[in-house]
Image: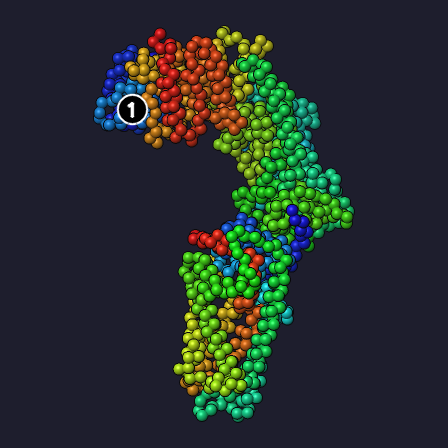
């Protein structure tokens, strides 16, 4: 047998876990109902039972290198069925929260993102930057709300080439670099884990083909969301996240098209498009559809989250993300509407808020819940690659428990 | 002797399925001089019915009542006419109408002519009841001078509570405690598991207040530093010889409560965990002492431990000891079996020397206590040393009942870590700390924990496993018999009669009968006190205490015919019979439970009860009309069913629509132990084709309400098998089956299979003689 492990419990870590969302983890008495109920857990070394006992014992090393925290999709069935009310689903969420916070520095960002008392500072960074820009451009135009031919042109106050693209570009590079480091860290940790050999399962040839499988079979279809359960709240969650995800995709496409045509247009003039884009422009249509879809998705998800149930608790990180995306969506739509209505006194401030909120969404991405965009996909990719797959894939059968 | 019997038929319980007029006619013809009243009543089981019968009694018309309707297990409130009027119940409803399985397969239709097998069955049963009454004397209980004093042996938590229960009920209690102080182990605890809501914190026991209440109670006498030397006599009239500081004294008591509790299990069982080898491996009891003194430190260097490991699971480490003990047990069983073979079958060996029954198993029996203790003591660690950690490695965390709240509260402490697992090694590591290795843990790996202090569990071994305790001056021995069946616990083996023991008038409470928490023990104390009082209040009225509560009959001996064979004195499950120099039995009626095992044992049939005797049942058996051939009315099979499990099972089967052959004749007996072999001879002689005995299960996990009855019956039947064989009667004709009260659905098959077998064997060769 393998060498015995010398345990050295970290009491502070236990308290950290409790604070990060696993506040009831000490109630668990290891009956394993959670692991049995979980539709996504592999059969060997299943989760979330072992995470609960590791949590109780403060075994930090085991927990921070645990790939299963990403295999969990927070359906909440474990918390619902737990006979002790130990809420294993919340512990899994806490582990993810701690991953967002601690995987990559700077440490202060992780700390700021963890509590509402730091929110003013997070808002202040982009707010101050863009207020400075506004002061400069405002004084150039002689008014904080300039018009061009009687039309509101946001580029007058916040010129894309100088104030938006560079700042957001840098932020994006920073975020990409952060994610790279984060994924490298977790991959290194998983490399050290025992491999699984599953009869009849063909491992992907490479990480890339594994990644492609994850996108094709899980992300595009949102297939795993169907395993969440049969309640109305599960249906709402599925619809909400699906719509939200595709609205993000649409808006991402739009932003990319704008970026490419704008900067590309400086070299290849035929690419150039005029701003603001007219409403009949297909890119603009996609953008508006995306915006509406965003709101629809948000309504679903917010409605569900407002309904408190046994499956899921909502903490600061959840409301922060929802809140930021709401502000992005509402300020975005409102900016467009106010611009088209010509209310300059309101349009510019709202656009300012839009820039601030978009900055918060992007720049702080790896430390927010939205970090799951990269971390979960990376972990799912690696899991398939190393053979750690859910029972469904092992057995090609549905492992859904209807209770 | 009943001379004027009133026979009453209850039409409402039988309905139109039996020709009651014809039945009544038959009775009148057969028993004209003995039965002045033979009547059909519309609804007998009612106040009106009862009054009618009472009138006939008051007029002097009848002096005994034969009720033909429902089973004796129902409606008894209507058919009680006082101890001077015997009542016989004929089960026409259950055992005739409901259970009737027509040989031709026809179903019973109301109003139709009653099939002859059913009518014959009913006739036989009524005749048997009349015969029964003719051989019944109204019982007069033997009232005994009763000492209304209860001896409470043991002045610990249970004993103190028992004494208070006894005294608060108005009876005298004498507490005998071998130590100089009262309080037992409860007084040595720092705290105990929760005694009250919300059951989340350990509490001080309050034993001091308990001791005070006992010492201040005017109905309780306390004798500390005193032991029981000898206990003689019978319930109501026990003589206890006590030895204390001031010498020996005699004390008369009516009953005794054994609350002598437990001793710590021998530490040899925890030596594989390093106890004795490493100074910093202590027992749970020693840890408790540390807490009581006020500080938890390592014995080796007096330093405060930063981690304490509580070990509850170490199965593989016990393997060697277990193998040794099991081998020893097997060897002893072999020797005993050889001894039994060598002796003649009629003699039952009586154990002369007391055998200790402590074993490795007592640790597992203490599961609830060791589990709770580990939680309690883990919290001591956190209470005394907030910076230290406590670990518990368990096989089971047995926390029943309200203590679940305590379990949750203990888990909530971040400094207490629990895992299931098995400790496979405890060894010392260079720097003076101890390492505990555990395998098959919930963590997923085999783990090693660095421990500054290791606590190993203390098993609770009942005092009765180590010492005779009750010191009886009974012929059958000074201790409770067959304690090895219960691993030394003074257990009754019945969840329904928990405080009973095999010695009437002596009741067990607390951890001497099962490892128990303090609240459970207090409950036990009250329960046993009630039993002890019930004993006094039965004996003083000449009644049996239990389980035939209120029974006024008792075994009467015709010593003229006694041959001093000693079978009754040895086989009495309760040691009720002493013997004189020649070996003639000396009955102690108050010890007796009226089971009739002595009656069944006696080859000369000298023993009988006023309303239950060899002659009575024999007459009932021969009262049945046996056809000369199978074709002329079927075979006849006698079924003797014990009233405790088998007879109720028969009733239940009938009431749930089960049916069986109409060729059986069922007679209830008090216990299969009371079945005298002459009854089988009577049956065979009369021409019965078979005899089936239905009784409780026997063996290690017996359910026989009189402990040994059905086992003895089985042995006796095996003995007569030889005799029968020599007479040309097949031994398959006489069988015994074990029936539990919930086996009612097996009854029809049991009976019908037996009947089928009789058909195969053919008619009794002595039929028609």
From what the image shows, is residue A299 above or below residue B137? below
Whole-percent x, y for residue A397 in the image: 45, 53
In the image, B315 versus B638, the foreground residue is B315
In the image, B270 versus A73, the foreground residue is A73
Secondary structure beneath disc 1? Answer: loop
Whole-percent x, y for residue B756 in the image: 36, 21
Quarter holding residue B315: top right
Specify whether residue B514 is in view.
yes
Which residue appears at 63% of the width and 43% of the height? B422
Give the residue number, with chain letter if any, for mark 1: B102
Label 1 Cα crowd, 10 Å radius (few <14 / some 14-19 / many 20+):
some
Which residue appears at 55% of the width and 34% of the height? B525
Specify whether residue B458 is in view.
no
Quarter holding residue B99: top left
Whole-percent x, y for residue A93 in the image: 54, 61
From what the image shows, is residue A53 above or below residue B323? below
In the image, B737 versus B656, the foreground residue is B737
- Work out which quarter of the rendered image holds the C terminus of chain B and state it: top left
Which residue appears at 37% of the width and 26% of the height? B748
Q: Horizontal placement of B578 versus B101: left or right?
A: right
Whole-percent x, y for residue B440 in the image: 61, 46
Which residue appears at 38% of the width and 20% of the height? B757
From what the image shows, is residue B569 above or below residue A400? above
From what the image shows, is residue B134 above or below residue A236? above
Outermost residue, front direction?
A: A205
């Amino acid at each position: 047998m393998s060498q015995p492990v010398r345990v050295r419990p970290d009491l502070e870590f236990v308290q950290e876990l409790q604070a990060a969302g696993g506040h009831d983890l000490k109630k668990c008495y290891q009956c394993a109902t959670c692991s049995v109920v979980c539709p996504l857990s592999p059969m060997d070394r299943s989760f979330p039972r072992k995470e609960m006992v590791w949590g109780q014992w403060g075994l930090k090393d085991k927990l921070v290198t645990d790939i299963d925290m990403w295999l969990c999709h927070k359906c909440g069935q474990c918390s619902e069925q737990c006979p002790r009310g130990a809420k294993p689903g919340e512990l899994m969420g806490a582990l993810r929260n701690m991953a967002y916070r601690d995987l990559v520095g700077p440490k202060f960002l992780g700390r700021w993102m963890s509590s509402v008392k730091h929110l003013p500072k997070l808002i202040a960074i982009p707010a101050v930057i863009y207020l400075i820009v506004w002061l400069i451009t405002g004084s150039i135009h002689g008014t904080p709300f300039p018009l061009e031919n009687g039309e509101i042109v946001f580029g007058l106050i916040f010129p894309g080439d100088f104030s938006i693209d560079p700042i957001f570009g840098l932020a994006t590079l920073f975020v990409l670099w952060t994610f790279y480091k984060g994924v490298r860290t977790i991959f290194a940790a998983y490399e050290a884990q025992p491999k699984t050999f599953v009869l009849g399962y063909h491992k992907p040839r490479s990480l890339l083909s594994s990644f492609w499988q994850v996108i094709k079979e899980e992300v595009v279809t949102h297939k795993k969301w169907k395993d969440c359960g049969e309640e109305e709240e599960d249906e709402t969650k599925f619809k909400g996240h699906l719509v939200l995800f595709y609205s993000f995709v649409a808006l991402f496409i739009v932003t990319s098209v704008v970026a490419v045509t704008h900067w590309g247009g400086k070299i290849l003039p035929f690419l150039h498009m005029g701003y603001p884009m007219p409403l009949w422009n297909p890119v603009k249509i996609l953008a508006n559809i995306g915006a509406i879809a965003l709101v629809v998705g948000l309504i679903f998800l917010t409605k569900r989250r407002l309904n408190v149930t046994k499956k899921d608790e909502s903490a600061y990180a959840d409301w922060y993300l929802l809140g930021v995306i709401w502000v992005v969506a509402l300020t975005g739509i409102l900016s467009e509407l106010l611009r088209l209505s010509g209310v300059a006194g309101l349009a510019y401030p709202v656009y300012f808020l839009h820039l601030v909120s978009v900055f918060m969404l992007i720049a702080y991405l790896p430390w927010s819940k939205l970090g799951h965009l990269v971390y979960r996909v990376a972990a799912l990719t690696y899991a398939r690659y190393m053979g750690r797959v859910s029972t469904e894939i092992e057995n090609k059968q549905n492992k859904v428990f209807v209770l | 002797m009943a001379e004027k019997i009133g026979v009453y038929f209850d039409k409402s319980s039988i309905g139109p399925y039996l020709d009651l007029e014809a039945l009544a006619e038959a009775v009148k013809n057969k028993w004209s001089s003995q039965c002045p009243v033979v009547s059909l009543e519309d609804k007998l089981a009612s106040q009106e019915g009862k009054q009618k019968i009472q009138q006939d009694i008051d007029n002097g018309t009848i002096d005994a009542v034969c009720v033909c309707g429902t089973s004796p297990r129902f409606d008894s409130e209507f058919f009680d006419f006082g101890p001077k009027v015997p009542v016989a119940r004929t089960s026409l409803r259950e055992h005739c109408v409901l259970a009737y399985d027509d040989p031709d397969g026809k179903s019973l239709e109301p109003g139709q002519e009653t099939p002859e097998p059913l009518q014959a069955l009913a006739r036989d049963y009524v005749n048997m009841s009349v015969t029964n009454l003719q051989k019944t004397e109204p019982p007069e209980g033997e009232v005994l001078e009763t000492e209304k004093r209860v001896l409470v042996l043991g002045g610990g938590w249970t004993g103190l509570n028992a004494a208070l229960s006894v005294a608060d009920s108005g009876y005298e209690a004498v507490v005998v405690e071998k130590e100089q102080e009262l309080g037992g182990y409860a007084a040595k605890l720092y705290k105990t598991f929760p005694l009250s809501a919300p059951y989340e914190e350990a509490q001080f026991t309050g034993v001091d207040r308990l001791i005070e209440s006992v010492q201040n109670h005017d109905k309780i006498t306390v004798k500390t530093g005193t032991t029981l030397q000898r206990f003689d006599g019978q319930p109501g009239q026990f003589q206890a010889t006590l030895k204390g500081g001031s010498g020996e004294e005699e004390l008369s008591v009516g009953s005794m409560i054994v609350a002598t509790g437990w001793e710590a299990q021998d530490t040899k069982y925890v030596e594989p965990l390093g106890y004795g080898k490493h100074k910093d491996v202590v027992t749970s009891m020693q840890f408790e002492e540390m807490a009581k003194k006020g500080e938890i430190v390592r014995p080796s260097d007096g330093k405060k431990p930063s981690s304490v490991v509580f070990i509850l699971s170490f199965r593989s480490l016990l393997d060697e000891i277990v193998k040794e003990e099991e081998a020893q047990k097997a060897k002893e069983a072999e020797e005993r079996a050889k001894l039994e073979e060598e002796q003649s079958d009629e003699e039952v060996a009586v154990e002369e020397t007391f055998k200790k029954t402590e074993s490795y198993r007592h640790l597992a029996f203490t599961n609830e206590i060791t589990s709770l203790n580990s939680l309690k003591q883990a919290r001591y660690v956190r209470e005394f040393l907030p910076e230290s950690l406590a670990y518990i490695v368990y096989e089971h965390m047995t926390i029943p009942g309200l203590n679940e709240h305590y379990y949750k509260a203990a888990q909530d402490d971040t400094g207490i870590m629990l895992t299931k697992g098995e400790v496979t090694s405890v060894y010392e590591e260079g720097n003076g700390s101890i390492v505990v290795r555990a395998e098959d843990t919930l963590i997923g790996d085999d783990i090693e924990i660095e421990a500054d202090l290791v606590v190993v569990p203390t098993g609770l071994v009942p005092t009765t496993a180590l010492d005779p305790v009750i010191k009886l001056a009974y012929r059958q021995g000074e201790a409770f018999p067959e304690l090895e069946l219960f691993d030394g616990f003074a257990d009754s083996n019945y969840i329904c009669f928990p405080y009973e023991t095999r010695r009437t008038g002596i009741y067990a409470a607390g951890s001497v009968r099962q490892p128990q928490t303090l609240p459970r023990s207090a409950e036990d104390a009250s329960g046993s006190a009630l039993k002890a009082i019930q004993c006094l209040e039965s004996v003083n009225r000449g009644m049996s205490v239990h389980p035939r509560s209120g029974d006024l009959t008792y075994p009467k001996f015709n010593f003229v015919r006694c041959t001093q064979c000693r079978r009754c004195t040895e086989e009495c499950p309760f040691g009720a019979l002493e013997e004189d120099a020649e070996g003639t039995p000396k009955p102690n009626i108050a010890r007796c439970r009226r089971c009739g095992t002595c009656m069944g044992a006696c080859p000369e049939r000298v023993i009988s009860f006023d309303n239950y005797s060899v002659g009575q049942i024999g007459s009932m058996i021969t009262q049945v009309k046996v056809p000369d051939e199978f074709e002329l009315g079927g075979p006849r099979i006698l079924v003797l069913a014990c009233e405790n499990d088998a007879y109720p099972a028969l009733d239940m089967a009938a009431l749930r629509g089960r049916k069986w052959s109409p060729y059986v004749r069922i007679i209830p007996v008090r216990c299969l132990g009371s079945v005298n072999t002459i009854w089988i001879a009577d049956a065979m002689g009369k021409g019965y084709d078979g005899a089936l005995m239905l009784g409780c299960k026997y063996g290690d996990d017996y359910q026989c309400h009189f402990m040994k009855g059905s086992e003895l019956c089985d042995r006796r039947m095996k003995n007569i098998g030889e005799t029968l064989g020599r007479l040309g009667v097949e031994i398959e004709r006489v069988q015994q089956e074990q029936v539990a009260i919930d086996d009612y659905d097996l009854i029809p098959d049991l009976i019908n299979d037996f009947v089928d077998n009789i058909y195969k064997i053919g008619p009794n060769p002595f039929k028609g003689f």
